[in-house]
Image (tube, grey):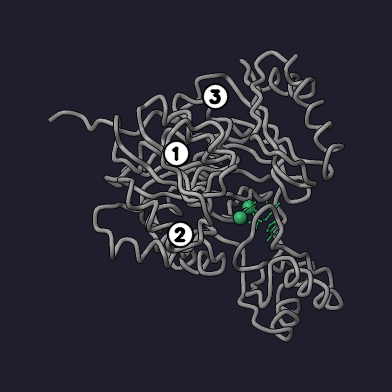
């Protein structure tokens, strides 16, 4: 039997931001036609060269159906899509595959539902509770103690759906912060504070045949709840790394569908590993794989959803670090700072600069990233400091 051939395959992506943009390069190399549904100036379209993108909102059922008509498989670069519309596409258009499954996307996009499912499969998690009223939020404080974390169940990213509740007097402020930042009424839930010593992440890929493979464990460092730095491999004990990959693979095993999954983890002082959250797509803490691993997360996502053989996930360099270029302020001032970071990175050996082509800089917006590779972690750390 001949191996499946990627050439001529067509993939549709809901969302054309930086993740869709970084999928374009492996798509070109493999002869896969990659079409996105997003605004006409979306970052992925700048580097595409393909005709047939769909201009519109990736939550619009009609646009999703239109994209689905011209591709073999539909996938996502963001989980905040219209999962119902995706499920309807499967019913009306039997010629198209959706990966990962609409059901997986629907469960993961609701962080509370995600945690309930993971919990029912015995994946280690911090304590969490449903919060449907002010009274619930106060009762949670009595049970968990303060501070605890109040979270929006849906539409969360870069910490925008999180509020720290420092005391009972903070409940109203936290509830209104989440209500105003993500639209009313906002479904909420609470998490007990996790006193982690490190945050880690594992990228896991699952092929159409169910085969799982995971990338090395990385250490992630957040600033203002946005990923700032990512070090690969994580500088942790080998047993911790093995356990982390085990937890990540078990978590992904709770969902169906092919593709990349990004699994965020907490490491506690006593070596306990708890899962924070999972993303059903390539993930910011997997960007380092482009320069540092045999197969990038973007290529493996395409291979997985098309039923092609998965590529090796191991490091091909001694160590790597990724630094996110995040807007420090709105407008020209912020853009100038981005340019300064790019200029200094260009003088660093082993540094690869990625800019996402976003026309405007905004405070807290991901504008690009730099991956630095080297023979050893200490060399990489020296290069990052430079
Ligand atoms: P992302 O951009 O990764 O999707 P998000 O908006 O979904 O992020 P979380 O991952 O839930 O937000 O939280 C952001 C950060 O806040 C975490 O990486 C961690 O640093 C901190 N955090 C989240 N939950 C807790 C918790 N229960 N206890 C302590 N810190 C937490
Ligand atoms: Mg999240
Ligand atoms: Mg997160």
Residue that numbered label 2 is attached to: 105
Measure the C-alpha gap from mark 2 to mark 1. Answer: 20 Å
What residue is shown at x 71% (from left), y 38% (from top)? 359
Q: Quadrant of residue 211?
A: top left
Would residue 174 be found to the left or right of residue 110 on screen? right
Is there a contact, CB below 8 Å, between mark 3 and mark 1? no
Residue 292 - label: 3
Would residue 74 be found to the left or right of residue 373 on screen? left
What residue is shown at x 65% (from left), y 16% (from top)? 350
Looking at the image, which is closer to me, 333 or 384?
A: 333
Residue that numbered label 1 is attached to: 214
Secondary structure of residue under mark 3: helix
What residue is shown at x 71% (from left), y 69% (from top)? 150
Residue 352 - label: none
Q: Is residue 289 visible?
A: yes
Q: Quadrant of residue 333?
A: top right
Label 3 or label 1, whichever lies nearer to me, is 3
Secondary structure of residue under mark 2: helix
Is there a contact, CB below 8 Å, between mark 3 and mark 2? no
Looking at the image, is mark 3 or mark 1 earlier in the sequence?
Answer: 1
Return the x and y of residue 103 as percentages of the image width and height. Answer: 40, 63
Answer few, some or many: residues within 10 Å of disc 1's Cα (few below 14, many 20 plus, some between 14 and 19). Answer: many
Measure the C-alpha gap from mark 3 to mark 1. Answer: 14 Å
Return the x and y of residue 257 as percentages of the image width and height. Answer: 36, 53
Looking at the image, which is closer to me, 364 or 236?
A: 364
Looking at the image, is mark 3 or mark 2 earlier in the sequence?
Answer: 2
Vertical comparison of 210 with 6: above or below: below
Would residue 116 be found to the left or right of residue 43 on screen? left
Answer few, some or many: residues within 10 Å of disc 3's Cα (few below 14, many 20 plus, some between 14 and 19). Answer: many
Looking at mark 3, is its residue's CB closer than 8 Å to ligand 1? no
In the rendered image, which quarter contains the N terminus? top left
Q: Is residue 247 visible?
A: no
């Amino acid at each position: 039997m001949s191996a499946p051939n990627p050439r001529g395959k067509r993939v549709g992506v809901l969302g054309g931001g930086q993740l869709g943009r970084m999928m374009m390069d492996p798509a070109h190399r493999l002869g896969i036609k990659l079409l996105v549904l997003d605004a006409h100036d979306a970052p992925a379209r700048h580097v595409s060269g393909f005709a047939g993108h769909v201009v519109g909102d990736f939550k619009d059922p009609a646009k999703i159906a239109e994209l689905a008509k011209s591709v073999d498989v539909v996938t996502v670069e963001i989980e905040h899509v219209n999962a119902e519309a995706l499920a309807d596409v499967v019913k009306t258009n039997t010629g198209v595959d959706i990966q990962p499954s609409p059901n997986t996307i629907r469960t993961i996009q609701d962080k509370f539902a995600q945690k309930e499912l993971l919990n029912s499969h015995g994946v280690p998690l911090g304590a969490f509770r449903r919060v449907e009223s002010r009274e619930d939020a106060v009762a949670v404080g009595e049970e968990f103690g303060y501070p605890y974390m109040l979270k929006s169940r849906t539409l969360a990213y870069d910490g925008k759906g999180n509020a720290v509740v420092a005391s009972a007097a903070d409940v109203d402020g936290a509830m209104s912060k989440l209500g105003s930042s993500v639209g009313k009424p906002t479904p909420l839930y609470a998490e007990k504070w996790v006193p982690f010593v490190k945050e880690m992440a594992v990228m896991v890929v699952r092929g159409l045949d169910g085969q799982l493979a995971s990338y090395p464990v990385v250490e992630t460092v957040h600033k203002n709840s946005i990923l700032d730095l990512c070090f690969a491999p994580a500088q942790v004990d080998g047993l911790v790394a093995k356990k982390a990959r085990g937890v990540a693979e078990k978590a992904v095993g709770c969902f169906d569908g092919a593709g990349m999954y990004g699994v965020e983890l907490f490491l506690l002082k006593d070596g306990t590993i708890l899962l924070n959250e999972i993303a059903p797509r390539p993930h910011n803490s997997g960007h380092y794989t482009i320069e540092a691993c045999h197969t990038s997360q973007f290529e493996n996502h395409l291979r997985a959803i098309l039923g092609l053989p998965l590529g090796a996930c191991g490091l091909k360099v001694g160590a790597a670090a990724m630094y996110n270029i995040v807007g420090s302020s709105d407008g020209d001032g912020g853009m100038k700072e981005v340019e300064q970071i790019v200029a200094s990175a260009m003088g660093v050996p082993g540094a690869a600069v990625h800019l996402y082509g976003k026309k405007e800089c905004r405070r807290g917006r991901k504008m690009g990233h730099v991956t630095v590779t080297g023979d050893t972690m200490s060399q990489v750390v020296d290069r990052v400091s430079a």
